[in-house]
Amino acid sequence: MKTPKVKLKISVNADIKNCIFFIKYNIKENPQYIKWFLPKEVHYVLKNKNKSKIDKILSEYIKNVFKANNKKIIENVKKAEKDWRVVEKRYFNLVDKIFKKHPWPNGKYIGFASIFMMYPRDVREKTFLFPGIIYKNTPPVEVVIGHELLHFIFFDYIKKKYNLNIDSKIKGKEDDYLWKVSEVFNSVIEDWDTYYRIFKFKTPPYVAKNFYLKMRRQWSKDQDINMLLGRWLKNK
């Protein structure tokens, strides 16, 4: 089975784009996410109603943080590359079993170092953000990489099997139902002992905990991806 070659890069412009897009995407639907995303020292920009001014302030902030932490970010990225190489073979072997040898979708598979503590991804391009600066509660970078790659193969799998895209709406369900299922699925897999033995780190679920408890019970009884997702997506 051909597996992706993950590349990790440092790009100030990528993190600026990441920040501006994240705020634009969540400003109405999930304003709390923005407060989690932005350090408290720049929360004041949210009071500004001028979008171009907000973008300028945040762009300068990001450039300054990258400049001040340049050496440390470079060190962190080099360490992340080594840590990922240690686990990638076991990771890909396990994911291959979980998804029944479903081929990995084509894409860039590039991670960009971020100064923030939330790591969005672009499922279509196969790019993602990862910790460029290590804070108190920052998860290990290899865990973040594994998490994002799970999203990439998950959405490709449900596209082929259920004809569902990342932005598909399901009748009778909230607009973000598919996103919630994908995040809960990741949490269930990350909590599974077989997966845990690779990374030695568990990511607590942060959305739809009622979904999570139910899906975890289902997976513990039968580790079959078709049976599991069929309960959540088939004939919806």
Image (cartoon, rainbow, N blue to C red):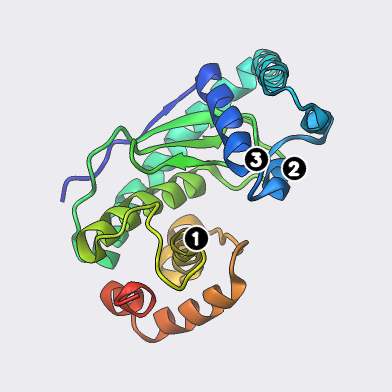
Q: Which mark is residue 162?
A: none
The residue identified by callout 3 is 117
> In the rendered structure, which amino acid carries the disc numbered 3?
Met
In depth, the one of 183 and 78 nearer the eye is 183
In depth, the one of 21 and 119 nearer the eye is 21
Nearer the camera: disc 3 or disc 2? 2
Question: Is 93 situated above or below 14?
Answer: below
Say whether disc 3 or disc 2 marks the residue closer to the N-terminus.
2
Residue 89: x and y in percent read 30, 49
Say whether disc 1 or disc 2 marks the residue closer to the N-terminus.
2
Label 3 crowd bin: few (<14), some (14–19), many (20+), radius 10 Å:
many
| Image label count | 3
Q: Which mark is residue 35?
A: 2
Residue 141 in view in this figure: yes
Label 2 crowd bin: few (<14), some (14–19), many (20+), radius 10 Å:
some
Residue 30: x and y in percent read 66, 50
Label 1 crowd bin: few (<14), some (14–19), many (20+), radius 10 Å:
few
In depth, the one of 24 and 96 nearer the eye is 24
Question: Is 8 situated above or below 104?
Answer: above
Determine whether, in the image, residue 94 is placed left or right of residue 139: left
In the rendered image, which quarter contains the C terminus?
Answer: bottom left
The residue identified by callout 1 is 175
Residue drawn at (84%, 30%), measured in percent from left and top?
A: 44
SS state under label 2: helix
Circles 3 and 2, Cβ within 8 Å, touching? The answer is no
Say whether disc 3 or disc 1 marks the residue closer to the N-terminus.
3
Question: Is 191 situated above or below 104?
Answer: below
Determine whether, in the image, residue 220 is placed left or right of residue 160: right
Q: CA distance from mark 1 to mark 2?
A: 22 Å
